[in-house]
Amino acid sequence: MLRTILLGPPGAGKGTQADRIVEKYQVPHISTGDIFRENIKNGTELGKKAQEYMNRGELVPDDLVVEIATDRLLKDDCKAGFLLDGFPRTVYQAEKLDEFLEAHGQKLDKVIDLEVGEQELMVRLTGRRVCKNCGASYHIVNIPPKKEGICDKCGGELIQRADDNEETAKNRIDVYNKETAPLVDYYEKAGNLARIDGAQPADQTFESITAALGQ
Ligand code: AMP
């Protein structure tokens, strides 16, 4: 049983570490960004609503996000715990999550804050490429695929996320500093924050995370 949140700016490596955490702890990976991208791909109403905000690097309105996140947390697979990635992103969302957990007799075990400097974040975001087919993540310099533009895992085409261009990436970091960074304080006060150096190589970052989770 593990109930945890992965906090950190865009480009800190939340997706990469989330994949490893869910494999080790066997909990569902709940990424609100992934849920939105899936809805955009499928042309749903939710996707249409979210897309305009996402393309500008802005946050999708709180009430919409809280609804989709709490709906997801009500699914059976979350009884064994969960890993939240990219939610909550505002103090309001964190308060709503606390209300939800309290109403369901649940408590967070840990909040992992992945810390990476801004310059490094920009390098990571603008160089990121993702597989159109399976979502696997690469970096043109740090984690290049074996064959340029092609996913090692499934042979799918590698593309740049629409919001990973320089201007939108910069805006996402600014939005993070303004809206999401206060959550570090919020969870520190709650007493369950673990600060992790996300600038380390991915393997070492994962070791630091498992040490903090202590299970
Ligand atoms: P991510 O994949 O987590 O980087 O999210 C991509 C985009 O989805 C963000 O830049 C936001 O526009 C939107 N998004 C994802 N999660 C949230 C959230 N918890 N609150 C508001 N917007 C979100």
Image (cartoon, rainbow, N blue to C red):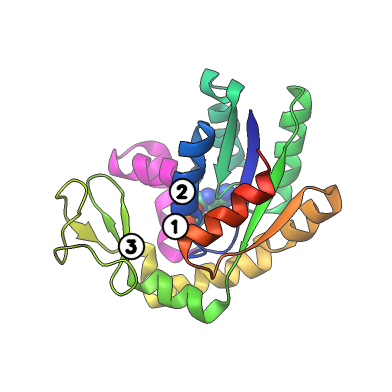
State which quarter of the image contains the N terminus.
top right
Determine if the C-beta at disc 2 is less than 8 A from ligand 1: yes
Mark drawn on residue 54: 1
Which class describes the residues within 10 Å of circle 3: few (<14), some (14-19), or many (20+)?
Answer: few
Region rendered in magenta: 34-57
The residue to which callout 2 is attached is 33
The residue to which callout 3 is attached is 162
For the residues labelled 3 and 1, say whether their Cβ atoms are less than 8 Å apart: yes
Label 3 vs label 1: CA separation? Answer: 9 Å
Q: Secondary structure at mark 1?
A: helix
Q: Earlier in the sequence, mark 3 or mark 2?
A: 2
Residue lying furthest top in this view? Answer: 76
Residue 130's spot in the image, x, y percent? 29, 57
* 142 in magenta: no
Q: Secondary structure at mark 3?
A: helix
Label 3 vs label 2: CA separation? Answer: 13 Å
Q: Give, as a three-letter code, the residue at label 1.
A: Met
